[in-house]
Image (cartoon, rainbow, N blue to C red):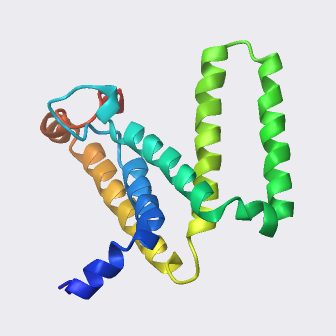
């Protein structure tokens, strides 16, 4: 059982970026589902909410760390910057701009999440993050297995919650 001290320790303002990382991993790893089942808006899809949290995490990290990555890890930043520029330049040969920007959006969000995780996860809480990732992956695997073994039962039961594209 959680004591008052443990709850205060978990919800300390210093832990907000780490809690955001945990929430992001949970939302991204699960199938895309409506967080409010009766509201069929793309705004309440779990993956879109996770994308918004990634942007918030990136902003919080920039504010809290004040670009500490540039001061501490110049070599890593240079490699990521070169890769970012190379990917950005590939728009010159893109034939389908909609597909390019969709992939580019995922690339930029991945960089933002990577920066947020890199700057906010330390030796004290990395074990907690690994435990969360393992548990979320196991739960997601169980959902996928149930979908495979009992497709009609699962699809009819959870059609209200999951995005239609999940069933295609």
Q: Residue at x 66, y 15 (%)?
A: 97
The percent position of residue 91, horizontal first and vertical second, equals 77, 22
Above-or-below relation of 162 to 101: below
Up the image or down, 57 lies above or below 73; here it is above
Residue nearest the viewer, comparing 97 with 160: 97
The image shows a total of numbered marks equal to 0
Quadrant in the picture for residue 138: bottom left
Query: How far from the left and from the top, in percent, is residue 165?
Result: 35, 27
* Residue at position x 46%, y 60% in the image: 21
Q: Quadrant of the C terminus?
A: top left
For residue 94, which quarter of the picture? Answer: top right
Compared to 151, does 79 lie above or below?
below
Give the percent coordinates (x, y) of residue 156.
14, 34
- Left or right of residue 39, residue 9 in this image: right
- Comparing 4 with 150, the one in front is 4
Above-or-below relation of 115 to 166: below
Q: Nearer the viewer, residue 62 or 46?
A: 62
The residue under the point 58% across, 42% down is: 109
Question: Residue drawn at (36%, 49%), measured in percent from left and top?
Answer: 30
Which part of the image, by quadrant, shows the N terminus? Answer: bottom left
Side of 95 where 107 appears, left or right: left
């Amino acid at each position: 059982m959680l004591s008052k001290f443990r709850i205060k320790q978990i919800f300390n303002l210093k832990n907000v970026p780490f809690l955001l990382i945990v929430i992001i991993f949970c939302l991204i790893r699960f199938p895309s589902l409506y967080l409010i089942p009766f509201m069929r808006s793309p705004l309440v899809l779990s993956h879109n909410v996770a994308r918004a949290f990634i942007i918030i995490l990136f902003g919080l990290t920039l504010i809290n760390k004040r670009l500490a990555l540039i001061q501490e890890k110049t070599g890593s930043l240079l490699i990521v910057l070169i890769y970012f520029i190379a990917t950005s330049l590939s728009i010159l040969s893109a034939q389908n701009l909609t597909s390019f920007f969709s992939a580019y959006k995922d690339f930029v969000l991945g960089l933002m999440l990577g920066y947020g995780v890199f700057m906010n996860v330390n030796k004290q809480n990395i074990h907690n993050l690994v435990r969360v990732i393992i548990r979320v992956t196991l739960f997601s695997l169980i959902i996928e297995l149930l979908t495979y073994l009992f497709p009609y039962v699962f699809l009819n039961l959870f059609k209200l919650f999951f995005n239609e594209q999940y069933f295609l």
